[in-house]
Image (cartoon, rainbow, N blue to C red):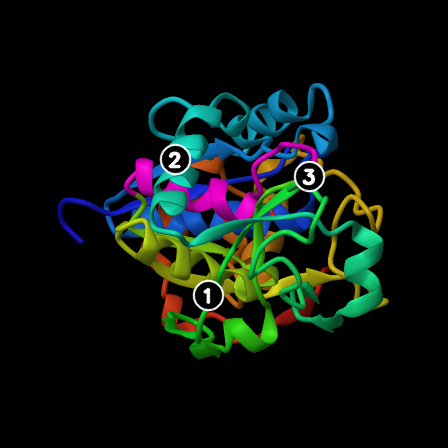
Amino acid sequence: MAGGYRGRFAPSPTGPLHFGSLIAAVGSFLDARAHGGEWLVRMEDVDRPRAVAGAADGILRTLEALGLEWDGPVMRQSRRDDAYRAALADLEAQGAVYPCACSRKEIADSSIAGPGGLIYPGTCRRGLPPGRGGRAVRLRVEGGVSFDDRLQGEIHQDLEREVGDFVLRRADGLFAYQLAVVVDDGDQRITHVVRGGDLLDSTPRQIYLQRLLGLAVPSYLHLPVAVNERGEKLSKQTLAPAVDAARPVPLLCQVLRFLDMPPPPEVEEGRVEDFWRWAVARWRPGSLPALRTRRAP
Ligand code: GLU
């Protein structure tokens, strides 16, 4: 696509890069470069207590060692509170948000579970209970959202029934991921999001927010999520090991095999520059595995 493709990789620096996040990095990079587009990197450290010291730099050094060169400066969510505050003020002015006094326990006692966690029962929707102060700020959701994922196909979520009014500013004062990611994708003028399928359930919430904030809705492609032998997503919590970037090409070839793009031996044994040239030329999103999960090698 001439003029305008902007993609991104947005890791959370909660630990070193593991195979699961490398899939999102490689997929988003290849899609951007195959479109002649830009590829940005954003550190999603909005959840400050979860960020691990040194992890952001470690991720960037790993990307460099793998030949994943990004465009422009790295955006860091921990420096973006003003932008999130302005977006929340916009939603407040629209009457789209309300303060919520409920504690975690109160919500747990009165809610049912949905795909994105507990469905908030709407206790504070019509005003705070007498004598109680607001802790978090929630978005009032009505109806549902549909979108066409480039790999997973038509997705519909009834936000009101399946998710409920969700938090934009947490009780600890931190802005929520759902708000930060939408404001950042908007400010960075991201046109194409390629990321792990674990975020498929979050996308309708993000599109709902984009519409309210008057932001363009990017196109989405959700790659299969890498899972371990127990079917758990590779993550820090499931003790996924850090990728070893000492031998970049064999590692990158593992990612391509995961994505059903097996490279020939001469690519596997070649230089990293030649690997990327081959992979960008061969990138065919239509031939990717349209799976929600797949076993990691
Ligand atoms: N920071 C999120 C993660 O590492 C990714 C967010 C996104 O790509 O939208 O899971």
Pointer 3 residue = 171
Element at badge 3? loop
Indicate whether residue 186 is drawn in magenta: yes
Q: Single out the mark in the foreground, 1 or 3.
A: 3
Q: Is residue 288 above or below residue 7?
A: below
Q: Position of residue 166 (x, y in %)?
A: 58, 57
Q: Position of residue 108 (x, y in %)?
A: 81, 62
Q: Distance from label 1 to label 2 (Cα)?
A: 23 Å
Residue drawn at (41%, 52%), measured in percent from left and top?
A: 279
| Label at residue 40 | 2
Pointer 1 residue = 204
Amino acid of disc 2: Leu
Name the quarter where the C terminus is drawn: bottom right
Amino acid of disc 3: Ala
Give the camera-side residue of 174 and 264: 174
Mark earlier in primary sequence (1, 2): 2
Residue 227 lies in what quarter of the image?
A: bottom right
Give the camera-side residue of 85 and 19: 85
> With 189 as the anchor, is 287 left or right in this view?
right
Q: For the magenta stretch, what is the residue range?
A: 171-189
